[in-house]
Amino acid sequence: MPHVNLNFEERAQKVCRQADVDDYQLQGAVLLKGLLNAAEVSLLTEGIEKNLETLSPRAKIASRKDDPGLFVEDFCNWREIEEYERFICDSPLAAVAARLMQSRCARLYHDHLLVKESHTAQVTPWHQDQPYYNVDGKQNCSFWIPVDSVPRAHTLEFVGGSHLGPWLMPRSFCDNQAKWFPEGSLGELPDIENNRRSFSILGWAVEPGDVVAFHMLTLHASSGVQERRRVFSVRFLGDDMVHAPRPWVTSPHFAGLEQALPAGVAMEHELFPVLWPK
């Protein structure tokens, strides 16, 4: 598919200043106000609605049956939904990711749809993302991109600086089971919610066009919502990120990848194209 010839690097430098890069490296999360233009937000919204109309086999309901709302997730649809592909490839996201990661390149890892419908009570508990994945390394970046206004009370929150600490035990969100690493092999998450004053908690009200960027090891969480919250996440890998096959099913799962790529090598595969530099 031909890509629009836009000066992404110029836009990236304008919206993602050196102070933002420094904050990302130090805090592990940063708000980028007005990164996306109205056309890009509209294109992404079209893709989200198309995705919701026809969920993939990878989709899951992440809220309980008695929840008054609904929390829907879906993964890895950029090759199937044209609007997603155009949005990811024809926006400054990859250029910004490379800048934040301080990486020569930005390789697409995967996309992730997260929609909490109105009055969804289900919280997203505190966790790190990287322990659920099949990659190792430090140069990575996740974008959290709402297409609806999100008030501070219902936004994604982070523990500043937690990406500099150790990996912590990943657990299933609804029943708190250690389905990935064996019990006792990683440290447990602290009780952040009941000791909020003991942590440097970051969070921002977000408007369409704003983007939150965070490291895959930054502890983060989210409350339930009152109003509909449609969010699209795009995740990028930098120069030092390598394949780390796991003996369990990762989230998301890339079937057969362990046969195509050995452990410890760059993610050089058609599923993970390099989007920056163009």
Image (tube, rainbow, N blue to C red):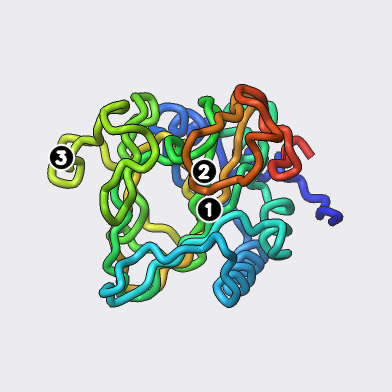
The percent coordinates of residue 261 (x first, y second) are 68, 31
Question: Can residue 144 be spotted in the picture?
Answer: yes
Above or below, comparing residue 115 to residue 129 in the picture: below
Q: Type of residue at label 1?
A: Ser
Q: Residues within 10 Å of mark 3 (few under 14, many from 20)?
A: few
The answer to which of 82 and 178 lies nearer the viewer is 178
> Taking 60 as reference, is 15 left or right?
right
Q: Quadrant of residue 160?
A: top left
Relative to 124, residue 190 above or below: above
> Residue 7's image quarter?
top right
Q: Mark 1 highlights which residue?
A: 233
Q: Earlier in the sequence, mark 3 or mark 1?
A: 3
Query: 188 left or right of 107?
Result: left
Q: Report which residue position mark 2 lands on.
A: 142
Do the residues under discs 1 and 2 have CB atoms within 8 angstroms?
Answer: yes
Which numbered disc flags the more N-terminal residue, 2 or 3?
2
Comparing labels 3 and 1, the label whose residue is closer to the camera: 1
Identify the residue at image location x=33%, y=32%: 182
Residue drawn at 58 percent across, 77 percent down: 53
Q: CA distance from mark 2 to mark 3?
A: 26 Å
Count neighbours of disc 1 (C-alpha within 10 A) and say few if under 14, some if 14 to 19, many if 20 or more.
Answer: some
* Residue 247, x across and y down, in percent: 49, 34
Q: Amino acid at mark 3?
A: Arg
Residue drawn at (59%, 69%), measured in percent from left and top? 51
Identify the mark nearer the N-term, 1 or 2: 2
Q: Secondary structure at mark 3?
A: helix
Give me the C-alpha separation between circle 1 and circle 2. Answer: 7 Å
